[in-house]
Each structure stands twice: as structure tokens, then as C-alpha cells.
Image (cartoon, helix red, strand yellow):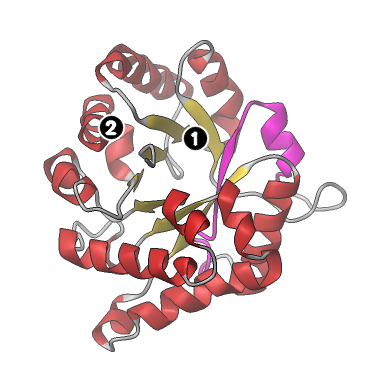
Amino acid sequence: MRKPLVAGNWKMNGSSESNQSLINGILEGINQVSDVDVLVCPPYVYISQVAQLLEGSTVALGGQDVAKEESGAHTGKISVSMLTDVGCKYVIIGHSERRPYYHDRAEVVAEKFIAAQKGGMIPILCVGELLEEREAGQTEAVVKEQLQGVVAHTGIKALENAVIAYEPVWAIGTGKTATPQQAQDVHAFIRNLIRKEDNDVAENLRILYGGSVKAANAKELFSQSDIDGGLIGGASLAADEFIAICQAAG
């Protein structure tokens, strides 16, 4: 039985004051959540603050991205060892906002994934299609290419210690959401793709949905057989909304 995971991606949002209020609200409501792993991914500069606020709680901490390099002359980058040093367990890899805007090509995503696992972190690998790709019937081909762009370098067993997040790019921050059936179809496709290589890995792999998930639609999305939680953007910035989503996952 796969334990659901709900991950809050704060993106470039937050302040010392608002972070404290948000975490306080999450911690007040977390006792209403059962059988769900909960994760927050704040901006780099606030990770240490959030780590202190979460100390002793069941809420895990993650990074929004990571460098493929371990150290050296890489101004502005953050290494895996830096993230683990401040308490991060997970890291988001290949988010749809990073692939096109920050030139995270397939080989870069694979290198970051490998670096994360080598350093003891659990990568959350994001895959998903653009609107024009969906309309052209290319969803499965795009998702397959993105997934295999990593697996070709790591082998299928690497997914034993990873999470996949399916995020249709056209449904991120747009207010549009894939229907539960649309989301389920892609999640099932991903799991079946992996099952062809290793059934045990496929059955145990958590596949999250990301794309304008809210308290109002979370329950129906999470009730689908191959959706194991969510990668939550804007709704993770409101404690009540985030807790309601976590409850829906449980």
C-alpha cells in the first residue's frame, strides 16, 4: 500500500513573518491528518528558518531545485550537501518552470536526479506536457521521453527511492485542472511504463499530481487509483487550504 505524499512547493514566495504564520497554521492542523506524508519546499533563503519551526514535527522539508555539481565556482547554485546540511530530505527535480525558463534539458535533469540520490536525498521528478502537446495527442510521448531521459542514465531501480510528479504544464497556475480521469490516465500510463521493466518498482512508486490542486478538487483527484498525492503550488501558501488537501489525501 502506497502512503500518500502531499508536497507544498512555495516557489518564490514567503517572508520571515509570513513563513512563521504559515508553518504555525500547518502545525496546528497537522494532527487532523493521518496516514499521509507531508512536505514543504520553501525558497532556499528560508529553509533554515522553516527547519527550526518544523523541529519535532512530522512535516518534512525539501528543496525546490539543486545543482548537479557538489561544490566549486558555481555562483548562485545550491548543492545536495548544502540541502541535507540544513535538514532537507526531498528535492524537486525538473519542474516545468525550470525546464524551459532555466534550460534544464533532459541531461541536466538526469544529472541533478543522480546527484540528489548520491547525496542521500529523495528526488521528486516532474514530468508533463504543454497545452499544444496535449492538443496534438503527444502527452504520452512527451511524458515517456522525460521519464526515460532519467531512467536511461540511472536504471529502473533508481525509482525505488524517488517520487514522480505528473504536472500538465497547461494546468499550473492557470486555474485549469486536468479532470480526475485525465490525470488518472497519465498516472496509469506512467505506472504501466515502469511496470514493463519492473513490477515491484511500479507498484511501490508514488506518483503525485500537480496542476492547480485545491481543497475543492483534491478528494476527487486523490481518489483515483494511481494518484498518490499532490505537488501543490499556490494552495500550499494558505495553511487551512493545504491542511484540507492533506486530509483529502488521507
Q: Which residue is mark 1?
A: 42
Q: Amino acid at mark 1?
A: Pro
Q: Nearer the viewer, residue 24 or 129?
A: 129
Q: Amino acid at mark 2?
A: Cys
Q: Which residues are magenta?
A: 77-101
236 with respect to 152 (left or right): left
Quarter that holds the C terminus: top left
Residue 30 in view in this figure: yes
Quarter that holds the N terminus: top left
Query: Where in the figure is residue 184, as x and y percent of width and height?
Result: 25, 62
Identify the element where label 2 is drawn.
helix
Number of numbered labels in the structure image: 2
214 with respect to 47 (left or right): left
**Who's the residue at 28% across and 22% down the image?**
33
Q: Which residue is mark 2?
A: 246
Residue 84 within the magenta-colored segment of the rendering: yes
The relative height of residue 193 versus residue 114 in the rendered view (above or below) is: below
29 with respect to 15 (left or right): left
